[in-house]
Image (cartoon, rainbow, N blue to C red):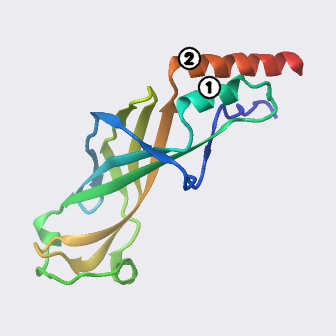
Amino acid sequence: MTGQEEEPRIILDKPVPINADFVDFEIEREDWNKYKLADNTLLKARFVLLGVLMDKSLDELRETLKKPAPDQTPKIGFGFRSQYVFSIEPPKKLRGTPDTGKYSVAELRNSIVEEDIDFETLRSTWNSYLVNNGIRLKIRLSPTLVSRTGKFDEGGMPIYVIDSNLDVKITMPEDIERIIKQRRNRAKEQS
């Protein structure tokens, strides 16, 4: 083995503990990602952050990090309340008869007519949020599997089933990053 995997600095506990509190945040950037599907449909995807939950305050985390326990990685319960928004702009040839029916995910998955449609990324951006305690969040929503069903919405647009993935980057305030670095250096010296 030639490489060494870096030890996690802080473990994000999942699921978020029930005692977690909401913390306020500011939107720095929230934008659309765009994809061109092989069927010539433009797919737009957007992550909308509605709430942030944490089970520890940063002061509690600082105290935990200062304790001499280099063999344990501190844990913090962190969670998001969010919505995923997908919009399509299909070519006219893919449009059909408007339908006001409401379908379950299972019904839609059973009505797929084109599965695993290839796509090209036209634009992929990170949304950015600043939590009121100094934590910076970067979040990106990306489709992983796109399939077209034989169903149509009330405007006659084809309904797609979209599986997606969320990428998350969390940057702690500088003083916590400094404590983590010192803690890591102490652990290296002791081994």
The residue that appears at 79% across and 28% down in the rendered structure is 70
Q: Nearer the viewer, residue 42 or 5?
A: 5
* Amino acid on which disc 2 is placed: Asp
Tell me where residue 85 appears, x and y as whole percent.
28, 56
Residue at x 16% of width, y 70% of height: 157
Left or right placement of residue 143 versus residue 66 in this view: left
Mark 1 neighbour density, 10 Å: few (under 14) some (14–19) many (20 or more): some
Asked whether the beta carbons under mark 2 and mark 1 sit within 8 Å of each other, the answer is yes
Residue tagged by mark 2?
175
Mark sitting on residue 62: 1
Report the quarter where the N terminus lies: top right
Residue 41 shows up from this direction? no
Of 153 and 116, the residue lying toward us: 153
> Looking at this view, is 50 or 189 the one in front?
50
Give residue 137's quadrant in the image: top left
Foreground: disc 2 or disc 1: 1
Q: Looking at the rendering, in which quadrant would you find the C terminus? A: top right
